Amino acid sequence: MAKIFCVANQKGGVGKTTTTVNLAAGLAKIGQRVLLVDLDPQGNATMGSGIDKRSMALSVYDVLLGEATIAQAATLADPCGYRVLGANRELAGAEVELVEMERRERRLKEALVAVADDYDFVLIDCPPSLSMLTLNGLCSAHGVIVPMQCEYFALEGLADLVNTIKQVHGNLNRDLQIIGLLRVMFDPRITLQVQVSDQLKAKFGDKVFDTVIPRNVRLAEAPSYGLPGVVFDPSAKGSQAFLAFASEMVQRIKTM
């Protein structure tokens, strides 16, 4: 039975997509069966997995509208080793079309039931806003992975996200919880980042992942080649950190 996790943060530019594709690739490298669901109309996780979003016959849009199953729409991201339920600009229209549908916030959850035994992990890349798409992701998930930079405004955004998760937990998905906070783009030479990191550890304790993802040029370069950093340059410090994070995730779900 797949463990389903949203990668979410209501603040933009914090590395959600980089985290999603590299965690997916890292998990695949250590033998896990992974499905990546791209819920962002920009389709960056799709393109970052080497799949051309403009040429997809079926996408997550078709799945949400009930016109295709995940088994029909998911594509193997080769050489990444995981499957992708991709997104493109069509997905922006789903916001409007879902409004009048029954169980609109549970469309993705119901579609995932059919493939739950086919994967060990399902990772959902959410857009940086509380939209109907994000709500579908949160209603589907067992938990939320929160990538965040160690800076002041990130703490403000985290407070908003925690409130959102509490509301979804109380009203729509009793399974939903924060799995952990992942410190990304971390530079230990910057005093403020070290201070914020210490504050996170003091306040959230073991909800903060031990793994820290460093600021890394190779991770930033990888999307232009249509690959996760873990595949593009496995020896880079950022890639090694994501492999460590994948191993930590496998261990953490054993205690859930």
Image (cartoon, rainbow, N blue to C red):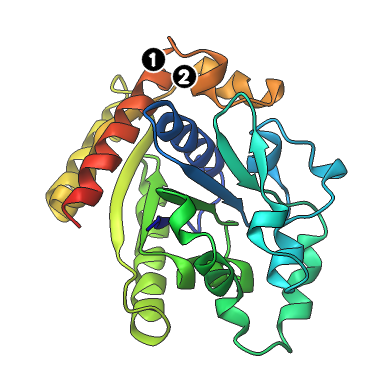
Q: Label 2, on which residue?
A: 216
| Along the viewing direction, whichever of 14 and 95 lies nearer the viewer | 95
Numbered disc 2: secondary structure: loop
At a point 71% along the width and 85% down the height, the residue shown is 99
| Along the viewing direction, whichever of 197 and 79 lies nearer the viewer | 79
Residue 253 lies left or right of residue 201; in this view the side is right
Q: Earlier in the sequence, mark 2 or mark 1?
A: 2
- Residue 134: image x %, image y %? 56, 66
Residue 45 lies left or right of residue 72; in this view the side is left
User: Looking at the image, is 106 positioned above or below residue 237?
Assistant: below
Mark 2 and 1 residues: CB-CB less than 8 Å, in contact? yes
- Residue 244: image x %, image y %? 30, 27
- Residue 184: image x %, image y %? 39, 35
Q: Label 1, on which residue?
A: 237
Asked whether residue 68 is in view, the answer is: yes
At a point 16% along the width and 52% down the height, the residue shown is 255
Which quarter of the figure is the N terminus placed in?
A: bottom left
